[in-house]
Image (cartoon, rainbow, N blue to C red):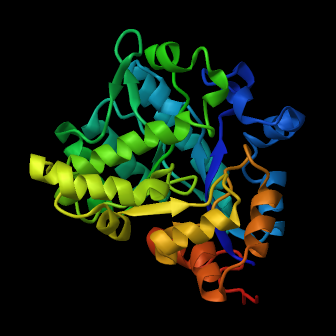
Amino acid sequence: MLGKVSLEEAFNLPDIAKAGTKDTTALYINPARKGEYDSQISDISGERLDISVNSGIGYTIYSHTVPGAQGEPDKAKSEELATRVNDWIYEKTKDHRDKCGAFATLSMHDPQQAGEELRRCVTQYGFHGALLNDVQHAGPDGNTLLYYDQPEYDAFWKVVCELDVPIYIHPAAPQGLLYDNMFKDRKYLIGPPLSFANQVSLHVLGMVSNGVFDRFPKLQIILGHFGEHIPFDLWRINHWFEDVEKPLGMVAKKSLHEYFQQNLWLTTSGHFSTETLNYCISQIGADRILFSVDSPYERIQDGAEWYDAAEMNLTDRIKIGRENAKKLLKLNKYQDSEAPVRK
């Protein structure tokens, strides 16, 4: 399928990539692919973009890799990093806007400042929203975790809704006390096996149960990796919310199913399973699912080839592959955006 849109594709600044990051990247990469990862993580408009186009991906949205600004506990340094990252990725994509764009990187220490930086990136740079690497680490030791389901973040969500752009909530590796208490002795559960889904599902379900989507009904949140396990426990979560938690006073006004229909999106990033895709279509609907790869942690070719061969009807293939993203991100014409799609 030509003209696919892929919107969870990571990059890093060359100097940060060369110095090594504070996360546990080695645990996310097949050792045999480490050289390929190193060559692609700061490659925006070169060979990596060519591979995407040759794989039928007409438009790639790049976002800063973990831990990003969320891993920097110092407010000033986190804000400085976010600005530097945004300026860098704009320069790298501005001459290739028929093939790629970006999500903003934001420091989330100060909701007001985060909103101002998002506004700058959307209005001046044409970014498509922002990607947040889960909670913001803060405090002198980095062990204070700031969650965006709290009322003080309403100032940020207000700006997001005014700009009418989505926010992608992406996982990050556990660090500080979270790492020491839970994962130090079970490091192979960091990342896709467990920690990623656990952390993001806690955060997003917190937004649901604490009424963020009721206060901001236009808010659109994207979840990668087929929803970080939430769809597979959808009935049980919703049963508990409706039959136990709401009688106890939970503020959420709608069912979990309704929030998925109105506020939440899933991507296929890093989860190339046709059985899982069809399950999510049955539970969430094809209208709320978006194609993505999760490069360079996963190979672009692998994600694209899997999707193009996956068993599904043509209408759903086109929706998930590009039409849903066009509507959500307000994309105009790009590489192969109107190319015919055949079974």
Q: Is residue 330 visible?
A: no
Image quadrant for the N terminus?
bottom right
In the rendering, at what x and y percent does residue 183 appear? 56, 20
Closer to us: 334 or 193? 193
On-image quarter of the C terminus: bottom right
The image position of residue 249, as x and y in percent, is: 9, 48
Residue at x 19%, y 59% (from the top left corner): 214
- Report x, y in % for residue 332: 54, 77
Q: Quadrant of residue 60?
A: bottom right
Left or right of residue 250: residue 325: right
Instruction: Give left or right: position of 76 versus 86.
Output: left
Which corner quadrant of the image does residue 185 belong to? top right
Q: Nearer the viewer, residue 192 or 144?
A: 192
Report the residue at 62% width, 57% height from top.
Answer: 94
159 or 311, which lies in front?
A: 311
Q: Is residue 153 above or below residue 76?
A: below
Q: What residue sits 73% from the left and 40% below the top?
A: 41
Percent x, y for residue 178? 46, 19
Counting the numbered discs, the total is: 0
- Closer to us: 220 or 101: 220
